[in-house]
Image: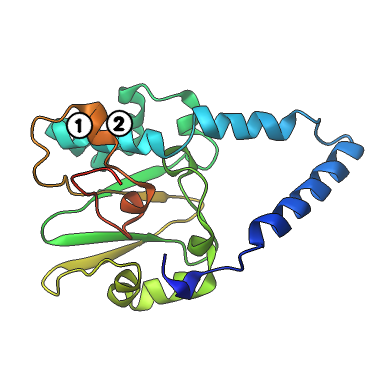
């Protein structure tokens, strides 16, 4: 991760303390129970996360008709693949996919806040919410991608897609070379959240 979007090393400890305090207050007031947070975390561990997005991308890599559907009507593709019903709710009611090509590289941002397709990408990383990332990625996406370690050829167009409460975008990265003959499950292992955000590409070998 680029140092430009780095955070203090103790951020997790400080945020965890805040979460515990807020949770205790909400329980005390009867707004939630002591099982509520655990249930939410279990949902994101088993039903909603980047493993759903990886399945969509892997299917698109092996099925051109499905890829066309994924780009044209993302929610229909989600339903066709039989992903859990949670994948069409909670931050994912109106998801849209855009596909990278040899001519175009897509980058997902949210200039207003941190709108993000949780059901297919999981929870947004810290840097995605960073005002510097949000502003600079809109103005100078090529430079920002270079800071992430992704140097996009000057001949390739970069398109930025601004997620909002109305539409939450994600990227179908290009299929890596030398992956012919791989199973759909193995292809899914090559798909990272970063590749589906457009700050990285899918590589022919899982990291």
Q: What element carries label 2?
A: helix
Question: In screen coordinates, is 69 left or right of 82?
Answer: left
Whether residue 145 appears in this view of the structure is yes
Q: Which residue lies furthest to the right in this view?
A: 28
Q: Residue 167 carries which label?
A: none
Residue 85's x, y, as percent? 47, 24
Q: What element carries label 1?
A: helix
Separation of residues labelled 2 and 1 (CA atoms) = 7 Å
The reply to whether dot 2 and dot 1 touch (C-beta < 8 Å) is yes
Residues packed near mark 2 inside 10 Å, few (<14), some (14 to 19) or many (20 plus): many
Residue behind mark 2: 77
Residue behind mark 1: 66
Whether residue 29 appears in this view of the structure is no
Q: In this view, does 51 lie above or below 142?
A: above
The disc, 2 or 1, on the residue closer to the chain's N-terminal end is 1
Residues packed near mark 1 inside 10 Å, few (<14), some (14 to 19) or many (20 plus): many
Q: Which residue is drawn at 51% across and 34% down?
A: 89
Residue 15's x, y, as percent? 70, 56
Q: Residue at x 20, y 31 (%)?
A: 66
Residue 120: quarter of image: top left
Q: Which of 70 and 190 is in front in this view?
A: 190
Residue 153's x, y, as percent? 15, 70
Q: Residue at x 14, y 54 (%)?
A: 101
């Amino acid at each position: 991760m680029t140092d430009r979007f780095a955070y203090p090393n103790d951020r997790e400890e400080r945020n965890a303390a805040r979460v515990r305090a807020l949770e205790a207050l909400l329980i005390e007031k009867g707004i939630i129970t002591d099982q509520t947070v655990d249930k939410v975390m279990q949902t994101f561990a088993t039903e909603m996360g980047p493993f759903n997005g990886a399945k969509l991308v892997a299917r698109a890599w092996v099925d051109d008709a499905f890829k066309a559907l994924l780009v044209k009507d993302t929610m229909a593709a989600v339903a066709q693949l039989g992903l859990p019903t949670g994948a069409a709710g909670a931050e994912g009611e109106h998801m849209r996919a855009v596909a990278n090509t040899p001519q175009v590289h897509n980058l997902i941002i949210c200039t207003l806040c941190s709108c993000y397709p949780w059901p297919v990408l999981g929870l947004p990383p810290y840097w995605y919410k960073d005002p510097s990332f949000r502003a600079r990625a809109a103005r100078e996406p090529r430079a920002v991608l270079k800071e992430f370690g992704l140097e996009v050829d000057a001949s390739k167009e970069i398109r930025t897609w601004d997620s909002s409460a109305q539409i939450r975008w994600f990227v179908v990265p290009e299929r890596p070379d030398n992956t012919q003959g791989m199973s759909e499950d193995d292809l899914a292992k090559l798909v990272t959240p970063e590749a589906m955000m457009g700050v990285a590409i899918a590589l022919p070998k899982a990291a």
